[in-house]
Amino acid sequence: MTKSVLLVGVGGQGTILASKLLTLGLMEEGYDVKMSEIHGMSQRGGSVSSQVRYGEQVWSPVIEKGSADMIVSFEKMEALRWLEYLKADGKMVINDHEMMPMPVIMGKAEYSTDIIEEIKKACKQVTIINATEEAMKLGNGKVMNIILLGTIIKTMKLDNIDWEKIVRENVKPAFIEDNLKALQVGMDLV
């Protein structure tokens, strides 16, 4: 059975790296995996999404509306923006973090203050964490994406994969230990 995970965020949050590590781990475990990424205006804080589909045989990387088993949102507004892609019984992990998009900064749009409440009305399985704050506690704010990867691993029951090996082989040596700690924090948060 094919599973679909949608990772959404804002440019510069590490969404692409998290999805690549997820893909590599799934491939290592023998799954057929397809991944696609959309950068949008990621260089300027725009929306970024990665779609990862895995199973015995996967034909397309595209996640249709209403078919994602899990959405992991690196930023609150992105969770709301992509909500319609979640299955009725899907799971969502939201980083309780705000990054104001350019239209809000310029005063042409408003940032909703009740995003979490709106999402909880539509989705029964929502986990809210502050991965940004947890990353700062580890002394490296940049590992927020790996904390969120840890939530995917635990939620999708993928903790039998050798994630330490995946991290050691694909992360710059100077950041390996921070990333391994972050991965564990993410798994412990769900």
Image: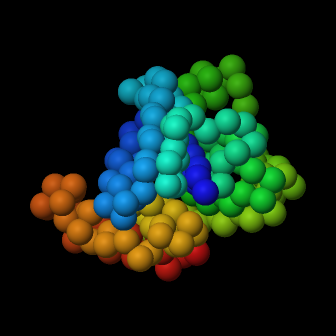
- In the image, taking residue 152 as reference, residue 144 lies left or right, namely left
Q: Nearer the viewer, residue 76 or 136?
A: 76
Residue at the extreme right of the image, as rendered: 121
- The residue shown at (47%, 70%) is 158
Q: Position of residue 174 (x, y in %)?
A: 14, 61
How many numbered marks have been drawn onto this rendered protein structure?
0
In this orientation, does residue 139 appear? Answer: no
| Quarter of the N terminus within the rendering | bottom right
Which of the 4 image quadrants contains residue 28? bottom left
| Quarter of the C terminus within the rendering | bottom right
- The residue shown at (27%, 63%) is 166
Q: Nearer the viewer, residue 184 or 44?
A: 184
Q: Position of residue 62 (x, y in %)?
A: 57, 34
- In the image, taking residue 51 as reference, residue 64 lies left or right, namely right
Q: Nearer the viewer, residue 56 or 28?
A: 56
- In the image, taking residue 28 as reference, residue 130 lies left or right, namely right
Which of the 4 image quadrants contains residue 93? bottom right
Q: Position of residue 121 (x, y in %)?
A: 87, 55
Q: Position of residue 118 (x, y in %)?
A: 82, 50
Colouring:
rainbow
- The residue shown at (27%, 71%) is 164
Q: Nearer the viewer, residue 9 or 137?
A: 9
Residue at the extreme left of the image, as rendered: 173
In this orientation, does residue 121 appear? Answer: yes
Residue at the extreme bottom of the image, as rendered: 188
- The residue shown at (72%, 57%) is 90
